[in-house]
Image (cartoon, grey):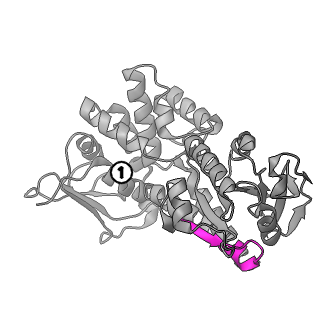
Amino acid sequence: MIKAKKIFQQLPLLRNIIINKRTGSLFFRFKPEGIVQRISMTQKKITGIDIDTYLPQLFSLPIYEYGWSSKITLTPDSYSDAITATVCGTIDQVQWQPKTQLTLKKSFSMLPAIQVLNRRPEIIWPDMKAYATLYNFAKRAENATPANFLALANDNDEETRFLKVLVMAYCLGFITSKSSQTSNIALRILERIRKV
Amino acid sequence: MKKEIAKILITGPFNSGKSTLIEFVSDEQHTSNDVETTDELAQFKALTTVSLDFGVLHVDDTLDVHLFGTPGQARFNFMWQTLSKGALGTVFLIDSSNQRAIDEAKQMYQFYRETSTMPIIIAATKQDLSSAQSLASIATTLGVAEESILSCNPCLKDDSKKVIIALLELIIKEESVSEAFF
């Protein structure tokens, strides 16, 4: 039996495709016997459904299968800013259920301390106040984990806004792990210490 | 170009070999603030570090590692807490041959685990002495798995390197778990 994939098993793939501007198809289906649907990541829409249809479903339904195919090869130049703009706009507009919110909150709370790469994102994100809060938090907090960021929310509405900015920043690559740098530094020291 | 500074802490109870380890893995070592031991520890060690041992390892043009050896008494735990901010990890050395040091190690280790999630590698020194407790016994005292404790003679350069390498490998391993999402 194929088990439904949790949201946070899919988001890293989406993030990887977007930030590396990979061309090809994201394919998925919502039921084991369902139709495999595809989104071209070279422009907003080629076949199948639009990404602005896919993302709300991603946040509301379990996905049984998903993956990536690079068989469709279009030039990277055609990778459209529409992808990031659409992801951004869709996350802003999406209405998710309390259960989904809880799942996302739990998933993001597992992440280590983060850093925010852009002071202002190169997209139109309507809730810039939440983004600025995230940026300043990551810059100043001693332990800038998403869990600690979400704990700043005063109420459920604010938690939703904070969660949305986290999901958007994660998918579009505006946040990264502080530990990525740590590993890199540890590797460099390792090479050096072996020569001591 | 501004150099990055990485920080590694070398800690553990008195007389466990912290200063010696730093000496072997550093390009520069700054003088320890060793003074005569004045309290009841004097019977074990004539000099002890009351301030900091400090070593620098030059990795390349853009990165230096600062190695801080913290004082070897539990009452100086607050210094470890201060120094641990931004540190990559900690080497925790324990004199296997001294019951009092092992008891102190238990207290120190509990404090570290309660106040930080940073990677810590434990190394038992003086395992060659007849009075040394086994790694299994020390592991039981600290409440950790035997496999997580290394045997180390800080007077041997390769042993000192081995402990630092183990710490770095632990750091990379722990980071790789969270990096799966990034």
Q: Residue A20 at what x, y percent from top left?
A: 47, 61
Q: Is residue B154 one of those drawn in magenta? A: yes
Is B7 displayed left or right of A66 in the figure? right
Is B156 displayed left or right of B106 in the figure? right
The residue identified by callout 1 is: A11
Report the label total: 1
Q: Residue B92 at what x, y percent from top left?
A: 66, 58
- Residue A168 placement: quadrant: top left
Amino acid under disc 1: Leu
Local packing at callout 1 (Cα closer than 10 Å; few below 14, some 14-19, many 20+) is some
- Residue A184 placement: quadrant: bottom right
- Evaluate whether residue B60 shows in this view: no
Q: Secondary structure at mark 1?
A: helix
Viewer-closest of B66 and B72: B72
Is A99 displayed left or right of A191 in the figure? left
- Evaluate whether residue B134 shows in this view: yes
Residue visible at 71% across and 54% down in the picture = B13
What's the chain of the residue with tag 1?
A
- Range covered by the magenta-colored residues: B148-162
Residue visible at 69% across and 76% down in the picture = B159
User: Farthest top residue?
Assistant: A155
User: Farthest left residue?
Assistant: A33
Q: Is residue B150 one of those drawn in magenta? A: yes
Q: Residue B117 at what x, y percent from top left?
A: 55, 48
Q: Residue A116 at what x, y percent from top left?
A: 57, 43
Residue visible at 38% across and 28% down in the picture = A160
